[in-house]
Amino acid sequence: MAPSEEVIAGQAVYNRVVLAGYDVFVLGFSCQFVWRCPKRHMLANYQRNVGARHVEFGAGTAYFLDRCDFPSVPPELTLVDLNPTVLRVSAARVARHSPATVRADVLQPLPFDDGRLRAGHYDSVGANFLLHCLPGTWAEKGAVLDNAAAALRPGGRVFGSTILSSGVPVRAPARRLMKVYNARGIFHNADDDLAGLRWQLDQRFTDIEITVRGCVALFEATKPAPDLGQAD
Ligand SMILES: C[S@@+](CC[C@H](N)C(=O)[O-])C[C@H]1O[C@@H](n2cnc3c(N)ncnc32)[C@H](O)[C@@H]1O
């Protein structure tokens, strides 16, 4: 199915100019002073959870992948994004790890049979600052977590962060910037609350940890082992 116009608009903003300023403006200034979650907390989330076989959903500038320590070097790294410019820029930044790239909409079932992505194979899936960019209800955004669960091996970790609009403290500057970004189709988080995020994680994962900093929820969770049923 072709991505909707909203989905296309949401990722199209990440052109070369925006990506050139992204680390400084979004990860530096906005994270610390508007969303009130300094980027070191996201880096710590990567450090805790990134595995030797890692898939990144919504790669952006690959800032955290460039800075985190993988448990083995080189890692097996796959970048998934709908935006071809993002894939070029992020893959170039972490070229030392020879990443594979997959152009796909994370709201739709990922192409696990195309030879570049393998179901049940990865130690970790990162989805940082992605969910608030995606249109839809929590149930619709849950498709991203279905893809993460499909990609992970049992015991693998999903982690990331997202900007919420309720259930967390949202100060006036954050509320104003969110309103602008939602009006422009850059964010779709007007209905994103903390309880909904927890519910979506609960449906698929165990060992769920959500840490709220400012209006950002940092999450981490484990894919459970398959339920083989009870022996008689
Ligand atoms: C705000 S950036 C986050 C980048 C990076 N993960 C970070 O933490 O800085 C969102 C990323 O998600 C990608 N993206 C947005 N919608 C997408 C979709 N439906 N499918 C795949 N990627 C998408 C964008 O192209 C962009 O690279």
Image (cartoon, grey):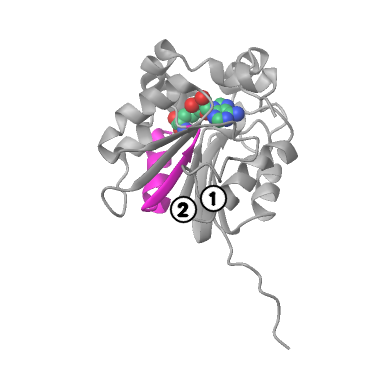
> Does 139 sit left or right of 34 as displayed?
right
Q: At 62% across and 67% down in the image, what residue appears?
A: 226
- Quarter of the image containing the N terminus? top right
Query: Which quadrant of the figure has residue 193?
Result: top right
Q: Is residue 28 above or below residue 167?
A: above
Q: At 38% across and 15% down in the image, what residue appears?
A: 21
- The image shows residue 129 at horizontal and vertical percentages of 52, 32
- The image shows residue 17 at horizontal and vertical percentages of 40, 10
Q: What distance separates the C-alpha of mark 2 from that of mark 1?
A: 6 Å
- The image shows residue 122 at horizontal and vertical percentages of 46, 53
The residue that disc 2 covers is: 122
- Quarter of the image containing the C terminus? bottom right
> What kind of element bears circle 2?
strand
The residue that disc 1 covers is: 151
Q: Is residue 59 above or below residue 126?
A: above
Residue sitting nearer the eye, 3 or 183: 3
- The image shows residue 47 at horizontal and vertical percentages of 36, 48
Residue sitting nearer the eye, 225 or 205: 225
Q: Is residue 119 visible?
A: yes
**Pointer 1 local density, CA inside 10 Å: few below 14, some 14–19, many at least 20:** many
Residue 49, magenta (yes or no): yes
> What kind of element bears circle 1?
helix
Q: At 70% across and 54% down in the image, what residue appears?
A: 203
Q: Earlier in the sequence, mark 2 or mark 1?
A: 2
Dot 1 amino acid type: Ala
Specify the farthest residue to the bottom. 232
User: Residues at badges 2 and 1 in contact (C-beta under 8 Å)?
Assistant: yes
Q: From the Cβ of disc 2, is ligand 1 less than 8 Å away?
A: no
| Residue numbers of the magenta segment | 38-58
Q: At 66% across and 74% down in the image, what residue appears?
A: 228
Q: Is residue 35 visible?
A: no
